[in-house]
Image (spheres, rainbow, N blue to C red):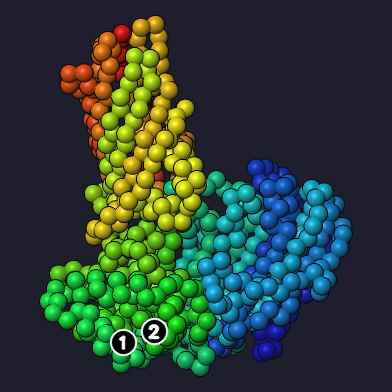
C-alpha cells in the first residue's frame, strides 16, 4: 500500500479503535434520536479504496444500538463474496446497555455458506455470516469487515439510513481514487456534496451524515426516495479478468458487454437446419419470431446459473442446445442465435427487473442490472422476448420488466431505450355475472372474469402452481363478501397476443344485502375487492407513482323473484381526475337490475402536491362502490 494511503487509512482505523473502546452507552444517544426507532446506528464508517483499475478494497465498520425486538435483524451480519472477491477480516463485539463488553465474535462463530438462491442451480456466490444472540434490550452490536475485489465494474451505493426504523447518529463514506482515475457519483435525496481532498496519491471523496431521526417512508414513492440521503458511485475505467473497459457513457458500457458475449452464438448444424425448416414458407417476420420463440419455450427451461466472468458472460448457445436449460443470459443468447440463423437480427438487452420498479438512473451510466431479455427490432415495431418464461406470448414482457430503461448491447455499443408501456386496455379485468336472488335475500352468482396482461399474472401463477385446495383458498381471499361459499370454480388459458385467463365461479351468498322490515338494502357492487385506501398525510414530500395502468369493468345482472320490486335506484355517477375515470350506474329492466361499473387507472409519476387529489379520488371511488339499491317485498 502506498505510504500516504497507509497513513490516511491507518490513522482512521486507529481513531476508530480508540473510539470503539469507549462504551456504547445507551444514555449517550442524543435526546429524541431514538423516538420511534427500533435501532440507532451509532457509527457507520464505509471506505472504498480503488487501488488499481482492476482491484479495490472495501472496509465497513458499524455499531447499532438495538432498542427493541423490531431491531432484531441488526444482530446478523452477512458479507457476500464470489470467486473474484475475498473477505479478509470479520470482527464483532456485543455490548450491554451500559456499553460494557459482553462478548466478542470468535472465528468459530463465523459461518461460510453458499448463497445459492432458491431459483438457482449453480452460483459462485457465497456469504460469510455471523450473529449475536441476546435478548436483554437495549444492547449494541458492532461489526467490522474488509473485502477485496478483482471486479471493479461495480462500485458501492451508500444509503446509511435505508431502514425506516433506524435512526442515525453518525455516518461517513469515503472513496479513495488513485491518481489518474476518475470517480463518477450521483447524490440523491438532499445528501450534501462530498468533501474532496487531493494528495500525490490521488483524491479522497468524503460524504457525512449526522443525527438523522427515523424517516417515515411515504407510500408509493420511487425506490431511491425511501432510502434516505445517499449516493451512487461508478467507475470511469475498470477491469474484469484482464479485460479493460469504460462506462463513462452507456455506449461504452454496452460495447464492453457486447464484446464480452460476442461469438458465443454458434449452433450445432442440425439445430440450425431445424430452425430454418421451422420457418420455411413463412413470409410474416412476426410469425417467424413466434415460431422460434415457441420452440425455445418448448425445448428449454430456466435455471439461474451465476457463473462466468463476474456473472456477465453467457454460456455458448451450443451448451443450451445440449443441456436444454440456461439462465436469462444463456436463454436470451440461444434465442438470439436461432433468430440469427433464420435471418432475423436481435439485441441482448440488460434490465433492472422486478415489480418494485428499481429503474436505472438514465443520466448515470452504471452496472445496476440484474436480468437479460431480447429485443427484436422490426421496421414498424419492436418485439420483446422474455426468454425465461415458458408460457408468455411472444412480445409480452409483463410487470417484471415493463416500462423501464434497458441497455441494448449492439456492435456499435450500448443504447439506452425503454421497454413497452402497457395501457389500461392491455391490463383488463372484465367481469360479468348473473345473480339470482330469492325473497329472503339469498343469492347465487354465476361469474365469469377475463383477465389480460398484468392483471392476469397473479391468476396465472395460481392456476399453474397451486393445488386445487390452495386455488380455492386464494379465491376466497379475493373477495370481501362477509359470508359466502364457492361451490365450483375453473381457470382456462386463452392464446392471445396478451396473456389471457378466464376464471369461472359459482358463489352462494346466504344474505345478499341488509334486511329492514320488508325492505332489502342491496349493494350491487358485490364482487369487486375493496383495495386499501391510501393514507392522507399532512405534508407529502416525495413524488408518488402508480405503477400499473388498468381497466376494470363489472356487469352484474340481478334476477329478482316475484314479489321483490325495486323501490330506489341510485343516480349514475361519473368523475374524472388526472389519475383515471370512474363510472357506475344501475338500471331496472323488467324483473332484473343491471349494475355496470367501469374504472380506468393511469400509471404515472406525480408531484407530491397532487397526492391529496389522489387520496380524494380513491375515496370517492370507495364511496361510490358502496352505493345501494332499495328492494321492497
Name the residue: 51% across, 93% down: 242
The image shows residue 425, relative to residue 152, as above or below, that is above
Q: How many marks?
A: 2
Q: Answer yes or no: is residue 616 visible.
A: no
Q: Which residue is mark 1?
A: 271
Earlier residue among tags 1 and 2: 1
Q: Position of residue 39 (x, y in %)?
A: 69, 51
Query: Element type at marker 2?
Result: helix
Q: Answer yes or no: is residue 2 visible.
A: yes
Q: Quadrant of residue 554?
A: top left
Q: Position of residue 437 (x, y in %)?
A: 32, 21
| Residue sticking out furthest to the front | 488
The image shows residue 343, relative to residue 446, as above or below, that is below
Neighbourhood count class around disc 1 (C-alpha, 10 Å): few under 14, some 14–19, many 20 upward: some
| Residue sticking out furthest to the top | 517
Of 433 and 410, nearer the camera is 433
Name the residue: 29% across, 73% down: 293
Of 566 and 620, nearer the camera is 566
Tell me whether circle 1 and circle 2 mark residues in contact (CB < 8 Å).
yes
Name the residue: 43% across, 35% down: 486
Of 214 and 379, nearer the camera is 379
Name the residue: 25% across, 88% down: 273
Q: Position of residue 353 (x, y in %)?
A: 42, 65
Q: Position of residue 252 (x, y in %)?
A: 37, 83
Q: Which residue is mark 2?
A: 321
The image shows residue 471, relative to residue 617, as above or below, that is below
In the displayed structure, does residue 84 sit left or right of residue 69? left
Q: Quadrant of the N terminus?
A: bottom right
Amino acid at each position: 500500500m502506498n505510504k500516504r494511503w497507509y497513513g490516511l487509512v491507518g490513522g482512521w482505523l486507529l481513531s476508530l479503535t480508540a473510539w470503539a473502546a469507549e462504551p456504547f452507552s445507551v444514555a449517550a444517544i442524543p435526546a429524541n434520536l431514538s423516538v420511534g426507532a427500533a435501532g440507532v446506528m451509532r457509527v457507520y464508517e464505509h471506505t472504498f479504496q480503488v487501488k488499481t483499475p482492476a482491484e479495490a478494497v472495501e472496509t465497513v465498520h458499524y455499531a447499532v444500538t438495538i432498542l427493541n425486538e423490531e431491531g432484531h435483524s441488526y444482530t446478523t451480519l452477512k458479507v457476500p463474496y464470489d470467486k473474484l472477491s475475498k473477505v479478509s477480516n470479520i470482527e464483532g463485539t456485543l455490548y450491554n446497555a451500559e456499553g460494557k463488553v459482553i462478548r466478542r465474535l470468535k472465528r468459530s462463530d463465523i459461518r461460510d455458506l453458499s448463497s445459492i438462491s432458491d431459483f438457482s442451480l449453480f452460483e459462485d456466490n457465497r456469504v460469510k455470516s455471523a450473529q449475536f444472540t441476546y435478548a436483554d434490550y437495549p444492547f449494541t452490536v458492532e461489526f467490522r469487515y474488509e473485502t477485496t475485489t478483482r471486479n471493479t465494474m461495480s462500485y458501492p451505493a451508500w444509503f446509511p439510513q435505508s431502514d425506516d426504523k433506524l435512526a442515525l447518529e453518525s455516518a461517513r463514506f469515503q472513496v479513495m481514487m488513485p491518481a489518474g482515475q476518475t470517480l463518477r457519483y450521483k447524490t440523491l435525496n438532499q445528501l450534501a456534496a462530498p468533501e474532496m481532498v487531493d494528495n500525490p496519491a490521488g483524491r479522497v471523496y468524503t460524504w457525512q451524515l449526522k443525527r438523522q431521526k427515523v424517516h417515515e417512508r411515504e407510500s408509493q414513492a420511487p425506490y431511491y426516495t425511501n432510502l434516505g440521503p445517499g449516493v451512487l458511485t461508478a467507475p470511469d475505467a475498470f477491469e474484469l479478468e484482464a479485460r479493460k473497459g469504460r462506462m463513462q457513457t452507456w455506449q461504452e458500457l454496452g460495447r464492453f458487454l457486447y464484446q464480452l458475449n460476442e461469438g458465443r452464438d454458434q449452433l450445432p448444424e442440425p439445430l440450425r437446419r431445424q430452425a430454418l425448416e421451422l420457418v420455411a414458407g413463412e413470409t410474416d417476420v412476426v410469425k417467424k419470431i413466434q415460431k422460434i420463440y415457441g420452440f425455445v419455450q418448448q425445448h428449454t427451461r430456466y435455471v439461474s446459473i451465476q457463473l462466468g466472468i463476474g456473472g456477465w458472460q453467457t454460456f455458448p448457445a451450443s451448451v443450451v442446445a445440449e443441456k436444454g436449460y440456461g439462465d436469462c443470459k444463456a436463454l436470451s443468447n440461444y434465442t438470439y442465435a436461432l433468430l440469427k440463423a433464420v435471418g432475423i437480427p436481435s439485441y441482448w438487452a440488460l434490465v433492472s427487473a422486478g415489480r418494485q420498479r428499481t429503474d436505472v438512473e438514465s443520466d448515470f451510466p452504471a452496472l445496476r442490472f440484474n436480468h437479460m431479455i431480447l429485443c427484436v427490432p422490426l421496421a414498424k415495431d419492436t418485439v420483446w422476448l422474455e426468454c425465461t418464461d415458458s408460457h408468455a406470448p411472444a412480445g409480452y414482457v409483463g410487470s417484471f420488466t415493463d416500462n423501464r430503461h434497458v441497455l441494448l448491447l449492439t456492435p456499435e455499443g450500448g443504447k439506452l431505450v425503454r421497454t413497452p408501456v402497457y395501457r389500461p386496455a392491455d391490463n383488463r379485468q372484465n367481469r360479468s355475472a348473473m345473480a339470482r336472488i330469492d325473497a329472503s335475500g339469498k343469492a347465487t352468482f354465476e361469474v365469469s372474469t377475463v383477465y389480460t396482461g398484468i392483471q392476469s399474472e397473479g391468476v396465472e401463477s395460481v392456476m399453474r402452481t397451486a393445488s386445487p385446495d390452495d386455488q380455492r383458498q386464494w379465491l376466497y381471499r379475493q373477495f370481501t363478501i362477509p359470508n359466502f361459499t364457492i361451490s365450483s370454480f375453473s381457470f382456462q388459458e386463452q392464446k392471445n397476443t396478451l396473456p389471457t385467463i378466464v376464471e369461472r365461479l359459482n358463489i352462494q351468498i346466504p344474505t345478499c344485502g341488509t334486511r329492514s322490515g320488508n325492505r332489502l338494502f342491496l349493494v350491487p357492487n358485490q364482487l369487486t375487492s375493496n383495495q386499501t385506501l391510501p393514507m392522507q398525510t399532512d405534508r407529502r414530500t416525495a413524488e408518488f407513482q402508480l405503477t400499473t395502468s388498468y381497466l376494470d369493468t363489472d356487469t352484474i345482472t340481478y334476477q329478482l323473484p316475484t314479489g321483490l320490486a325495486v323501490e330506489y335506484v341510485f343516480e349514475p355517477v361519473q368523475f374524472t381526475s388526472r389519475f383515471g375515470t370512474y363510472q357506475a350506474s344501475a338500471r331496472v329492466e323488467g324483473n332484473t337490475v343491471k349494475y355496470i361499473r367501469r374504472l380506468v387507472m393511469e400509471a404515472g409519476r406525480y408531484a407530491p402536491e397532487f397526492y391529496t387529489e389522489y387520496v380524494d379520488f380513491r375515496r370517492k371511488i370507495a364511496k361510490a362502490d358502496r352505493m345501494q339499491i332499495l328492494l321492497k317485498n
